[in-house]
Image: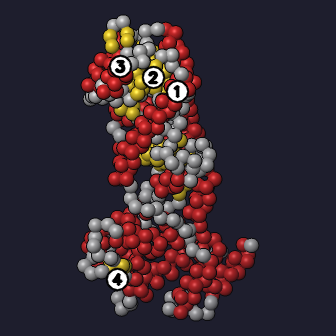
Amino acid sequence: MHVLVIDDEAAVRQILAETVAKAGNTVDEARNATEAAARLVRGDVDVALCDIKMPDGNGVDLMRSIKSGGIETTFIMVTAFASMETAIEALRAGAADYIIKPVNNEELIHRLGQIAALRGLRDENQALRKFMRDQASPLFRFESGPMAEIDRLVGRVAPTASTVLITGESGTGKGVVARSIHDKSNRADAMFLPVNCSAIPEHLLEAEFFGHTKGAFTSADKSRKGLFLQADRGTLFLDEIGELPLHMQTKLLHAIEDKEVRPVGSETSRRVDTRIVAATNRNLEEMVRAGSFREDLFFRLSMFHMHIPPLRERHSDLRGLIRFVLSRGRSGSSARALDIDPDAEELLLAYQWPGNVRQLENVLNRACILADGDRITIADLPPEFSRTLMPNASHGTPVARSGRSLRDQLREIEADIVLKMLEETHGDRRLAAVRLGIGLSSLYRKLDEFEESGILPADGAVRKGTASAEAGNG
């Protein structure tokens, strides 16, 4: 916390200031009520240790004046007069507590600790309410090999204090991974505060990140804590970090390295213990080479780098994700418990998902709204999914494969994908299975299905060819 010691006796100010500073707080001093009022009006003081009797005024009157201006500084009154009348007047005027001179240092630290706990709970409750409004329901546990590796990395880095950089295409689940890092860390009981850097107007970035005092700029009608102080002792998740302008990158780097922030309009820096997890869908290394991202900030953020693969590279997550999104929908605004037609699900499984998990959620949410019965059908999916059945549509000649069932047409599409992957891997079935995001046994099973349905010749040529190729590669 930031504490202002207000007393006309220099020796008392020095003793109180040293005691407060040793407890890990930042401290300013004021010699009288006039000096204190000029300091308090900025609104960046958390606690005022205020003498009641001063040459130019009364501490209780000073407190009333400050609180009438909407400033949320907590006052502890310090008095040499151990009368109940003085204490009652101070408490009625809005003081949180009072202590009597000569001040017992241990008692003072205890009182400050109580106030810090109460202020922290209030700030955390406010941030939690906002987070719960924005947060979607329970997190999905990915099952694919690539995401199992991500989960392993999360388990390694979470207990440390390291900054983390998470990269990946838009919609891949970077926010889910960031939240998992926080939940598995020793900061799990503190605040996890996500912020989208691209959503903050450039002229407000510094005030949003570091806070501001009252009157620091035209619209600053009261002081405000910044994101770093809100997430103190917790985790600040900076999404879209690549969108920060260069001047803000510099300030962010200093805040991370120095573990200090200075609110806009304040003359005092504040100590913070905030862990930074950053994410971006941009190539920061290319931005560094182009001069649009600071190299030192990139190195600082990427002390531990995790890349989230796109959904098309972890096909085995798809079916579970579909079920998960639909189960969430049942507890939402719709009163109907929706399922999905097998043919519609096959279309979703065959799709490449350029928008990743976010696109999948949007498609399923739209389908839930459009569905007439108790299940989602192909008719409820966007037009691009129907065009999956027309492989020549991209060439301007949509031709449906008439006379074949939907399941047969989908199987042909799937076979085409598998065979192309086998061709790319020169027949290496293990490598093909990894790239397709399926198990080796699943690949064998699919090849059997393709032969049984007549898509592939039943002489086992593909299986023999791939087996020999794999043996050759070994």
Q: Which residue is mark 3?
A: 86
Q: Is residue 177 left or right of residue 425?
A: left
Q: Which mark is residue 107?
A: 1
Query: In the image as oriented, which residue stretches furthest toward the top?
Result: 55
Marks 2 and 1 in Cβ contact (< 8 Å): yes
Q: On screen, 46 above or below 320?
A: above
Marks 4 and 3 in Cβ contact (< 8 Å): no
Q: Which residue is mark 4?
A: 400
**N-terminal of the two: label 2 or label 1?**
2
Q: Which residue is mark 2?
A: 99
Asked which secondary structure carries label 2, the reply is strand
Q: Nearer the viewer, residue 99 or 465?
A: 99
Disc 2 marks a residue whose amino acid type is: Ile
**N-terminal of the two: label 4 or label 3?**
3
List x then y, in percent, for residue 50. 40, 18
Q: Nearer the viewer, residue 172 or 409?
A: 172
Asked which secondary structure carries label 1, the reply is helix
Asked whether residue 81 is in view, the answer is yes
Q: On screen, 19 above or below 197?
A: above
Disc 4 marks a residue whose amino acid type is: Ala
Taking the spot 43% from the left edge, 82% from the top edge, the residue there is 410
Marks 4 and 1 in Cβ contact (< 8 Å): no
Query: In the image as oriented, which residue stretches furthest toward the front?
Result: 84
Instruction: Report the Cα–Cα distance between label 4 and label 1.
Output: 82 Å
Q: Nearer the viewer, residue 423 or 296?
A: 296
Q: On screen, 22 above or below 230?
A: above
List x then y, in percent, for residue 409. 42, 84
Disc 4 versus disc 1: nearer the observer: 1
